[in-house]
């Protein structure tokens, strides 16, 4: 299941106002590690579809949101609950390491 | 049971795969989950790899390597090796997903990992202004003042690349001699946005949520200064990735895997090593590729010298 793209325009509705746990993957075309971690996030999203929803935000096309959340390194993965950031993971990591970082939201 | 497993997917691993696959060994290549393609995945213009007179982007070059390896029958697995058993004639490789593969020979080409400064606040601010990847993170420092630590080719390349975004880039180097090649030095020296700070080391990184500055110490007179920067890019070299083979393969005093003469033969028969993991000196894409070739040929020779069963499968 490919993750939904969110934008500056849809971020509030899709992420902040969502009643689900949303992981936003801040990424860009030119970021090699982003491309590496993307399929891993898709796997996690599929395996835990009832717990967490993964969406992607292209920082090139959506600078406002990237700036608002002070993104200075990608891939950056932020977990949102009730409009608040509850967890930040920075950098591409192997699946077991990402699952460990996100354990609280996958169980 | 495989004839050959190659661990690593940089220029050394893929070149070994191309040669071994063409030699009919049907290699399995363990590419890693998030570091597949190696260091060149984080590089933009590669201008010194022969055959590309106009240069090529690092990720494109690695994509070509991968395709060429696959074309001749290399099987590629995007996972990380978590355990290696090199003790017997049959080597065992265990992956992050729990799978274990067996092979008669191994080529170990895991490259090197970026060196850290070893400062207290480095981990805390990693991803919040401290970065090891200019091509990933430079974008976020538009019109900012930032610093690069290091004096080698990668530091010069990063500094030059970062001037696309930043208004000002300091290069902090611990001596007054750069290790970088002349071409890279000249390019950095002639860039008006780059200012060199020689004979300085970084002692502190300041900032709560984000980097706000660094504390420098002069290596000559010991004087301390503070530099206001919103980003610090660390390019002080790399260390060979040998943690999986500690206690299993002999290492050199430099920390690379020890190999016999100009060969790729390690201290364990049937285990060969190539690329940056054996090279404390040159560390170039093309030398790694050459070293991968040596390893493939050595592995082929080793396999053909084994008693009948291996030979039968090879032929």
Image (cartoon, grey):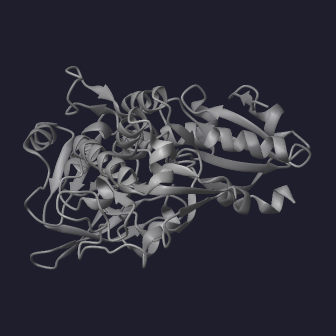
- Residue B68's place in the image compared with B281, above or below, is above
Q: Is residue B130 visible?
A: no
Residue drawn 28% across the image and 60% down it: B278
- Residue at image point 36% right, 34% down: B58
Judged left or right of residue B249, residue A28 is right
Quick check: B165 above or below B8? above
Image coordinates for residue B123, horizontal then vertical, percent? 49, 67
User: In this view of the protein, which residue sits in the foreground, B237 or B90?
Assistant: B90
Image location of residue A105, percent across then percent down:
83, 57
User: Residue sitting at 11 percent across and 42 percent down?
Assistant: B189
Q: Residue at x 52, y 43 (%)?
A: A33
Q: Is residue A67 left or right of residue B257?
A: right
| Depth check, front residue: A15 or B25 | B25
Left-right relation of B100 to B40: right
Front residue (pair A63, B294):
B294
- In this orientation, does residue A88 appear? yes
Which of B186 and B198 lies nearest the eye of the viewer?
Answer: B186
**Residue farthest along the top direction in this orientation:** B54
Quarter of the image for the C terminus of chain B: give it. top left
Hey, which quadrant is residue B252 in on the image?
bottom left
Q: Quadrant of residue B256?
A: bottom left
Residue A78, given in percent of the width and then of the height, sits at 69, 49
How many numbered marks have been drawn onto this rendered protein structure?
0
Residue B230: x %, y % from top left: 40, 53
């Amino acid at each position: 299941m490919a993750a939904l793209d969110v934008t500056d325009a849809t971020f509030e509705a899709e992420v902040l106002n969502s009643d689900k746990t949303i992981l936003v993957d801040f990424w860009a075309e030119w970021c090699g590690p982003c491309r590496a971690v993307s399929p891993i996030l898709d796997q996690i999203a599929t395996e835990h579809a009832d717990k967490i929803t993964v969406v992607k935000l292209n920082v090139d096309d959506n600078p406002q949101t990237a700036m608002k959340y002070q993104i200075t390194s990608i891939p950056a993965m932020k977990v949102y609950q009730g409009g608040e950031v509850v967890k930040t993971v920075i950098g591409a990591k192997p699946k077991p390491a990402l699952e460990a970082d996100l354990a609280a939201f996958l169980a | 049971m495989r004839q050959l497993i190659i661990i690593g997917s940089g220029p050394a691993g893929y070149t070994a795969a191309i040669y071994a696959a063409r030699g009919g060994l049907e290699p399995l290549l363990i590419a890693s989950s998030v570091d597949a393609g190696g260091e060149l995945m984080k590089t933009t213009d590669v201008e010194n790899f022969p055959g590309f007179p106009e240069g090529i982007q690092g990720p494109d070059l690695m994509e070509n390597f991968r395709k060429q390896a696959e074309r001749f029958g290399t099987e590629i697995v995007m996972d990380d090796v978590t355990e290696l058993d090199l003790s017997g004639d049959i080597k065992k490789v265990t992956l992050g997903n729990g799978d274990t593969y067996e092979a008669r020979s191994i080529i170990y080409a895991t490259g090197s990992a970026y060196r850290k400064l070893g400062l207290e606040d480095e981990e805390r601010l990693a991803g919040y202004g401290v970065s090891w990847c200019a091509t990933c993170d430079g974008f976020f420092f538009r019109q900012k003042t930032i610093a690069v630590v290091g004096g080698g080719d990668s530091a010069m390349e990063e500094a030059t690349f970062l001037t696309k975004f930043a208004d000002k880039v300091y290069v902090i180097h611990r001596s007054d001699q750069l290790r970088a090649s002349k071409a890279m030095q000249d390019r950095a020296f002639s860039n008006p946005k780059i200012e060199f700070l020689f004979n300085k080391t970084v002692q502190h990184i300041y900032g709560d949520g984000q980097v706000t500055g660094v504390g420098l110490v002069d290596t000559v007179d010991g004087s301390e200064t503070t530099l206001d920067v919103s980003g610090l890019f660390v390019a002080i070299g790399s260390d060979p990735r040998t943690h999986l083979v500690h206690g299993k393969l002999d290492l050199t005093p430099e920390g690379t895997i020890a190999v016999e003469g100009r060969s790729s033969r390690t201290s364990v028969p049937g285990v060969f090593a190539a690329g940056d993991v054996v090279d404390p000196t040159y560390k170039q894409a093309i030398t790694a590729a050459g070293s991968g070739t040596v390893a493939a040929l050595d592995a082929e020779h080793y396999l053909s010298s084994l008693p009948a069963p291996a030979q039968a499968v090879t032929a």
